[in-house]
Image: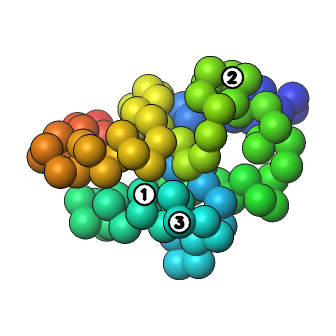
């Protein structure tokens, strides 16, 4: 399986997926830590991919998504954005609604 096919499969099979540095229990950058903290305030379960231990994904995902940085939050196969966008959505109350739509499917 090519790396792009693997990325597409991950996005297709995970209603809520965050590509991040580290894990939710042990984030390896401040942006990933803030993003996971925001997600955890809204939902109990979400999938993640640690791009630090998946260098091929770290290299190819920005090309596929046209988003240059990590973390990247994907909900219902759509790129939501990175840490700043996740925090803004949390503050304005939209993050919970977006994530709830994914858990209802």
Q: Which mark is residue 13?
A: none
Local SS, label 1 = helix
User: Which mark is nearer the camera, 3 or 2?
Assistant: 3
Q: Count every numbered label the image shows and give the total.
A: 3
Q: Which mark is residue 30?
A: 3
User: Which mark is nearer the camera, 1 or 3?
Assistant: 3
Q: Which residue is mark 2?
A: 64
> Decide: marks 1, 3 in contact (CB < 8 A)?
no
Q: Which residue is mark 1?
A: 35
Mark 3 or mark 2: which comes first in sequence? 3
Residue 27 picture quarter: bottom right
Task: Looking at the picture, tell me which residue is in the foreground, 90 or 99.
Answer: 90
Which residue of the protein is positioned furthest toward the left in this rendering? Answer: 93
The structure residue drawn at horizontal position 18% and vertical position 51%, both measured from the top left corner, is 91
Mark 1 or mark 3: which comes first in sequence? 3
Mark 2 or mark 1: which comes first in sequence? 1
Q: In screen coordinates, is 71 left or right of 76?
A: right
- In this view, 34 is above or below 82: below
As measured in the structure, the alpha-carbon distance from the residue carrying label 1 to the one carrying label 3 is: 9 Å
Disc 3: CA contacts within 10 A as few (<14), some (14-19) or many (>=20): few
As measured in the structure, the alpha-carbon distance from the residue carrying label 3 to the one carrying label 2 is: 24 Å
Task: Looking at the picture, tell me which residue is in the foreground, 74 or 102.
Answer: 74
* Residue 53 drawn at (x, y percent): 81, 61
Which residue of the protein is positioned furthest toward the bottom in this rendering? Answer: 25
User: Which mark is nearer the camera, 2 or 1?
Assistant: 1
């Amino acid at each position: 399986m090519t790396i792009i096919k693997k990325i597409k499969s991950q996005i297709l099979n995970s209603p809520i997926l965050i590509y991040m540095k580290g894990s939710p229990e042990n984030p390896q950058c401040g942006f990933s830590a803030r993003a996971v903290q925001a997600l955890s305030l809204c939902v109990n379960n979400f999938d993640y991919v640690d791009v630090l231990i998946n260098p091929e994904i770290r290299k190819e995902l920005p090309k596929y998504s046209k988003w240059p940085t990590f973390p990247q939050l994907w909900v219902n196969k759509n790129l939501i954005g990175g840490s700043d966008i996740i925090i803004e959505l949390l503050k304005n109350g939209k993050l919970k609604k977006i994530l709830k739509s994914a858990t209802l499917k």
